[in-house]
Amino acid sequence: MDSKFFFNLKSAKIFQAVKWARCPVFSLAQPLGKLFSVLLIFVFLIFLYGFLGENLSNSANSALLGLSIIFLTLRVLFWLENAFFEHKLKRPALSATIKDALEKLDVNLAEFLDFETARAVAAADQFAQSPKSPLTNSACLFCFLLDKSSGLEFIFQRDLLDIREIKSMLKNQLKEYLKKEKSSVGYAQDYQDTIWQSLKIAQKREHEQVVVGDVLSALAIYDPVFQKILMEANLKKEDIENLTWWLESLKKRMAERKRWWDWPNLMKKGTLAKEWTAGYTIHLDKYSVDWTEIAKKQGFPEIIGHAQVIEQVERVLARQEYNNVLLVGAPGIGRKGIIQGLVRKAVLGQSLPDVNYKRVVEFDLTSLLAETSDLEAVKVKLDQIFQEAISAGNVILVINDFHNFIAVKPGPGQLDISGAIAPYLNLPQFQIVAVTTYAGLHKNIEQNPSVLSLFEKVEVPEISEQETMRILENLTLALEQKYKLFISYPALREIVSLTKRYMPALPFPKKAIDLLDEVLIYVKKSTRDRVVLPQHIAKIITEKTGVPVGEMEKKEKEILLNLEALIHQRIINQAEAVKEVSTALRRARSEVNVRKGPMGTFLFLGPTGVGKTETSKALAQIYFGSEASMVRLDMSEFQDVKDIARLIGSPGEEGLLTTQIVEKPFSLILLDEIEKAHPNVLNLFLQVLDEGRLTDGLGRKVDFKSAIIIATSNAGYQVILQALKEKTAWSQVKQKLLDYVFEQAIFRPEFINRFDAVVVFGPLSQENLLDIVGLMLGSLQKNLKEKGIELEVTLALKEKLVELGFDPTFGARQIKRTIQDKVENALASALLSGTLKRGDKVEINPQEFTLVIK
């Protein structure tokens, strides 16, 4: 046992509360208080009835009044007793902090337990008091924590765990532990580790005492039984920590609502003589939304994330000059939440002096424009409104989509108000928060530097996954009530995880909130389920992105396991290339390791016509479902630096590559003849190959992690042909080819090294070409069969076609041309002339390539 571990509950102050809680005087105080409240009301009503109606004698009225006084006295006594227990005994003064306990060695750690935790520890200690009992372990603490604490059902229900089964399992575990272990006094190592970790978690959460959630989170780390339960349910210790935070947050909000005397609750009642304390804003009120009034009526929602951004906005608004904020961020990133956070702090007086108690008013310029199209009338109205805001002295203006109103060349729904607003932006009494996007900033506002210089730019970053999870948790109860469904915690976790991975172009929290709403609609309308599960999330993500996620279906597993055979149905020879691609796909889909880049990246080298492009087409057809899932780029079209903009887009122009991947992230990207692209274009792909992402010319994050990238090149094919003439071992050909590529500076080593594999395609032999002819004629047979015509293919025909089309330089492409010239042309003429018609059988004479119709 660790000598540093000083833990004695009986000598801790909180133990007095645990001990007195068993005494009927305190345990019955609350229910008896409620009983006497009911009796007091009942008797007093009878007294009033008799007194006012003169239906009772004076003596009866006196008796009832006396009873009322007795019941009132008892109610007050029990209330005082309960208050003494709740606020004095259950919350003893601490002589040290948790930080002191973690740093010093002589502090009794039990002093820092809250009442519920201490009660569970006391029960575990009492269980282990028998002389035959072994050391008290973490399972014993876990068992009694579940037994003595209230509200933990919430955590286990959200995790889809049965708390009764867990309690039963723990009791059986304790019985086995008592039988196997030797008797001893004290605490096992896992118990000690749990207590230490509980203190660390409490300190991180800024708790003064260790609460039940802290202990439960620590048990998820150190208790073997709990670890096994979580593993079997596909849960992690972080999930328990998140859920305990959720439960604590709900309890905190409920407690805040009960404290009607708190300032935020009093503010909901409104203030007196508001119009006396500031000037009137008649015109502004007509075209605005007063966020301050909304907050007072509806309450103050908890603002999660962006605390530093809110503080930065406050500091800018509190300046004596240039106190204008330009809030820049993507739609859905939380710009509205920042305004709400500003409102909350201003209303409650928790901000800076120049911001406190001011009205935050959103000026709706769109409604003003809808009312009149006369530019001069608009400017007059704007001047009135801005004057009112200054005269009132307590207004902070918010203008959404500010870029639409600083347009150099205004389009529909746009206006240039820079001339009207610029004079006011210099005044310290005029405070404004202008909200815009990065695209709006670059396209419109930056084109007006005189206005831009009067603003302080405040950028809004994306919130974290953990903060997004907490936002979803805060929304869950209201959404459950709306849709009459239960949302499991694993489903929420899956939303955050999958949207981050498969929807990178959209920001948190918007993409997570939108997906949750969409999933709820799907489950409500399309299934009979009453619980939202991870598989529902995976299904909607698959439908939205085209990427298969979640548990693999049987069909997909069969495709992956037999991928080589399926590809070889279309590809002759090239076993190495087929194997490399197949194994990469199996690794990516089974998620055996965490990849930063795309699912697979390959560089195919070899002469023309040997199957490089055909292998890519076959893979797109088999795994991605269609050759239409292949994004094919001829890299010879990107030989200039200026062509990069065509590839990744620019303001006003979509990117040939990036736009297609944003729309179809689950794709095969074929970069044909990549050696012909400009070196700067190749440098662009270094990040794509390495990290699987790219920022396009429009500022969007484009994700390539669900794609396979295949680059093809016939650079150095002469080396392959020469090596075959010299009968060089094939194992040495690849190295010779790479040496040539580097010597000629066709590709740089760092570019080559970014690929998962560099695959060299060898020239096709006559035997290979014979098989390829069979495949090509088989495709022709299939097409004719649909027309009701049977084509008989003979060995002599195939051999003759190979003889005519064999060319090591052009590979199978020459064969394809030969089939077109000799076979397809003859068949086409016969079909058009009516010589060959439905129901016929046809054979082709291999010498003269004439048709023999049967």
Image (cartoon, rainbow, N blue to C red):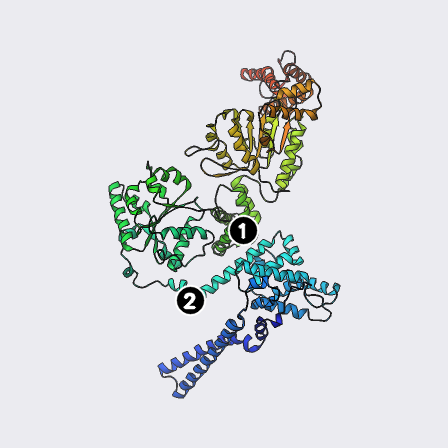
**Disc 1, SS:** helix
The furthest residue to the bottom: 59
For marks 2 and 1, the one nearer the N-term is: 2
For image coordinates 53% across by 64% down, the residue present is: 208
Pair 2/1: label in front: 2
Picture coordinates of residue 631 (x, y %)?
53, 31
In the rendered image, which quarter contains the C terminus? top right
Q: Using the image as rendered, state which of residue 792 and residue 8 is in the foreground.
A: 8
Q: Amino acid at mark 1?
A: Leu
- Residue 6 circle label: none
Question: Which corner quadrant of the image does residue 597 belong to?
Answer: top right
- Vertical placement of 840 versus 521: above or below? above
Question: Residue at point 55% right, 60% down?
Answer: 203
- Residue 473: percent from the left, percent from the top? 51, 54
Location of mark 1 (residue):
492
Q: Quadrant of residue 618?
A: top right
Real-space Cα separation, disc 2 to disc 1, in angstroms: 33 Å
Q: Residue at x 57, y 59 (%)?
A: 201
Which of 528/602 is in front? Answer: 602
* Mark 2 surroundings: few (<14), some (14-19) or many (≥20) residues within 10 A: few
Name the spot of residue 702 as percent of width and height, x first.
50, 38
The one nearer the camera, 245 or 447, is 447
Q: Amino acid at mark 2?
A: Trp
Position of 238 compared to 315: left or right?
A: right
The residue at which mark 2 appears reads as 260
Q: Nearer the viewer, residue 314 or 157?
A: 314
Where the N terminus falls, by quadrant? bottom right
